[in-house]
Amino acid sequence: MATSESPNETLVPYIKKSEFESLLEAKELFVMDCTASWCGPCRMVAPLMDKLAEEYKNQVKVVKLDVGDGENQSVAKEYGIRSIPAVMFFKNGELSETVVGVAAYDKFTTALDKILSPS
């Protein structure tokens, strides 16, 4: 059970499959970190997602999806996620980009800036 002293505490909220589907239907711009509690590399990406959420707080929603949770596994399967961490960028209800594995912060910001720039 997570406490306020938990090292896994994060600014980025966890969502369930139903909330993910609502974000898609609303055609919101969002970033989703596919993660799992047992995943060591995911813990390395977590502070980067916190930083991204803070830096882009007025432009994009950043969320986490625990793909180790049974209900959420179908989302990972649907999008072909075979390795985690996998950070997925959605715009207008469509997947725009995916960054798989531990990456430098600028890889996430570059992907997001590309999506945010007018087409």
Image (spheres, grey):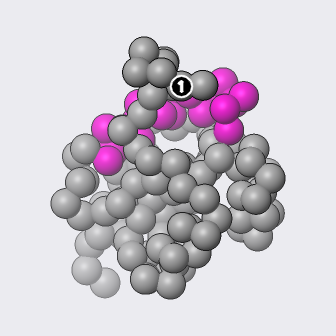
The percent position of residue 25, horizontal first and vertical second, equals 50, 84
* Residue 38 counted in the magenta span: yes
Q: Quadrant of residue 47?
A: top left
Residue at image point 25% right, 44% down = 54
- Residue at 58% across, 75% down: 21
- Residue at the far left: name it: 58
Foreground residue among 106 and 61: 61
User: Whole-percent x and y of residue 59?
Assistant: 24, 64
Q: Is residue 79 visible?
A: yes
Q: Is residue 62 above or below residue 118?
A: above
Above or below, comparing residue 4 to residue 109 in the picture: above
Magenta stretch, main secondary structure, is helix
Residue 32 vs residue 106: left or right? right
Q: Circle 1 sits on which residue?
A: 2
Please report the bounds of the magenta region as a residue range.
Answer: 36-53
**Residue 107 at x, y = what percent?**
43, 46
Q: Quadrant of the C terminus?
A: bottom left
Amino acid under disc 1: Ala
| Label 1: element kind | loop
Image point (59%, 52%), residue name: 65
Asked if one can make out residue 76 in the rendered structure from this viewpoint, the answer is no
Position of the N terminus, as image quadrant, is: top right
Relative depth, front residue between 22 and 83: 22
Does residue 106 show up magenta in the picture?
no
